[in-house]
Image: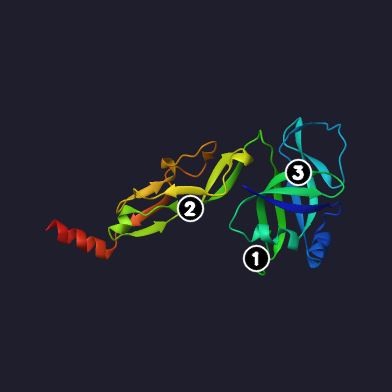
Amino acid sequence: MKTFNLEGTPRTDIGKKASKELRKSGFIPAVLYGQQPVELPYKGSLMPGEKIVAIGKDKGIVVTDLTVSFEGVRKLIYSPDIYLVEIAIKGAKTVKAILKESQYHPVTDDILHLDFLEVFDNKPVQMEVPIVLTGHAAGVRAGGKLNQSMRKLKVQGPANAIPEQLAVSIDHLELGKVIKVGELQYDNIELISPKNAVVCMVKMTRAAQSAATTASK
């Protein structure tokens, strides 16, 4: 994956009023979720903006409230590509993360909130990766029409093993045939999308059907 550099500022005032004022100033409230569990009760020190959220009776994760600028994340949000995000938290540390969720205003479509998940080389993450069809389908050459049903596949694996795109070869795809998720396989990652889901297919057009009928007579 390509790397996206982002600056974040710890946020201690997390009320609705404060968030509204941030957005007016061109900033977006965000949360960074840690992935490495910590023991409870937590005996370590916390930086500004950090807090511990329990994930069990004796385990928790570090959650950091941040602000990021709209200009800083614009190319990350409005891009078809996926990125490993390096967040430089002012006065604290730099972490590697992925963007897990973006919340938008239902009317204006303005960005309201962003959720990031910290990633580590030894811990798998789940992401949606764009699909790229490669080659020329045999069924299309025979007069069919290619239809791509899925644009992304959900995968699981180490962040440094997840590719920017997943190539799907369609050279062998005949008229009326489909490629399903369960037929695909990639090194070092696992496909999480339903195995029976159709990635693409070559539909039989009227012209191709007519030609096939004529040829059979």
Residue 93 position within the rendered picture, expressed as x and y whole percent measured from the top left: 82, 43
208 or 100: which is nearer to us? 208
Mark with earlier residue (3, 2) = 3
Question: As shown in the figure, which amino acid type bears the numbered disc 2?
Answer: Val
Mark in the foreground, 3 or 1: 3
Looking at the image, residue 76 sits to the left or right of residue 43; the answer is left
Dot 2 crowding, Cα within 10 Å, few <14, some 14–19, many 20+: few
Looking at the image, residue 75 sits to the left or right of residue 40; the answer is left
Which residue appears at 67% of the width and 36% of the height?
121
Dot 1 crowding, Cα within 10 Å, few <14, some 14–19, many 20+: few
Q: Which residue is mark 2?
A: 132
Residue 192 position within the rendered picture, expressed as x and y whole percent measured from the top left: 52, 41
Q: CA distance from mark 2 to mark 1?
A: 30 Å
Q: Which residue is mark 3?
A: 95
Q: What element does badge 2 sit on?
A: strand
Question: As shown in the figure, which amino acid type bears the numbered disc 3?
Answer: Val
